[in-house]
Amino acid sequence: MSASTPSAVHARGLVQTGPWGRVYGPLDLDIPAGGLTILQCPAGPGRTALQMTLAGRMKPKAGELTVLGRTGAGRIFPHAALAAIEDLDAVYASVRVVDLVTEQLRWDAPWYRMVRRTDQQTYERFCAPVFGELPPPPLHEYVENLSELDGLLLRVALANTGRPPLLVVGNIDQVTSDENQRTLVRRLVALGQEQTVITCTVNDVDPALGYREQLVVELDPEGEE
């Protein structure tokens, strides 16, 4: 990141610990504002904890963290969306898409406003920012029948209804098809036109897909236990 590029995330000496010891860190991290940044790091609890920390869902044990000019998980939380993190936003396979979307719209609405069951027109508007030119999955389909790509994009759409300035998305490795993974990256790049988007992978990603930056993150840089 060049000195003239504004920073969305600035971390120094960031550390997270759990019941059995250190989860990640200490690590330094600078993520530019806007566009899609891909963090290349191993899968596991350290990566998940880092993403939760960046989105204000977890307080770091030590170190300095500034996200969008804010410090402290309580101040970061309202300005960040977190999507496609297993065990956090996983959805029941036996639920229909229409019920998930209706529930989210009702959750977002003021308490005094009645929100009817989602119709096709409302559903298409709901999906449009995330799916773009891709057709959304059928409204009355069961979640268990969705493709990997459709299922992940739907989880992003459910988490990103408020369009906060920061969007953190699990990892692109959840989509196993190379072509679908490329499509996913393109959709995250498109969202990055209006938000700062962060996701993860264990592999190199083709720069031709248009992401802002790919950063190698050493979750255990000192090799400590």
Image (spheres, helix red, strand yellow):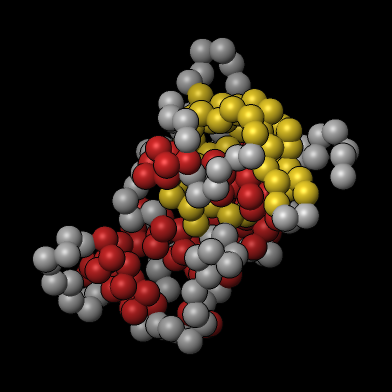
**The C terminus: image quadrant:** top right
**Can residue 19 be seen here?**
yes
Residue 194, above or below 151: above
- Extreme residue in the front direction: 19
x then y, percent, for residue 184: 55, 55
Residue 66: x and y in percent read: 51, 28
Q: Quadrant of residue 173?
A: bottom right
Name the residue at the bottom extreme.
Answer: 94
Q: Position of residue 170 (x, y in %)?
A: 58, 55
Identify the image quadrant of the N terminus: top right
Query: In the figure, is residue 187 to the left or right of 101?
Result: right
Q: Is residue 214 visible?
A: no
199 w.r.t. 148: above or below: above
Depth order, front residue of 142/115: 115
Q: Determine the residue positioned at 61% across, 33% down.
A: 213
The residue positioned 64% from the left and 63% from the top of the image is: 174
Residue at position x 64%, y 25% from top?
Answer: 12
Residue at 63% of width from left, 45% of height from top? 50
**Residue 85, position as x, y percentages in the image:** 57, 60
Number of labelled discs?
0
Q: Is residue 101 left or right of residue 86?
A: left
Q: As rendered, which of 156 and 225 lies closer to the eye?
A: 225
Q: Is residue 103 left or right of residue 196?
A: left
- Up the image or down, 223 lies above or below 186; here it is above
* Front-most of residues 128 and 222: 222
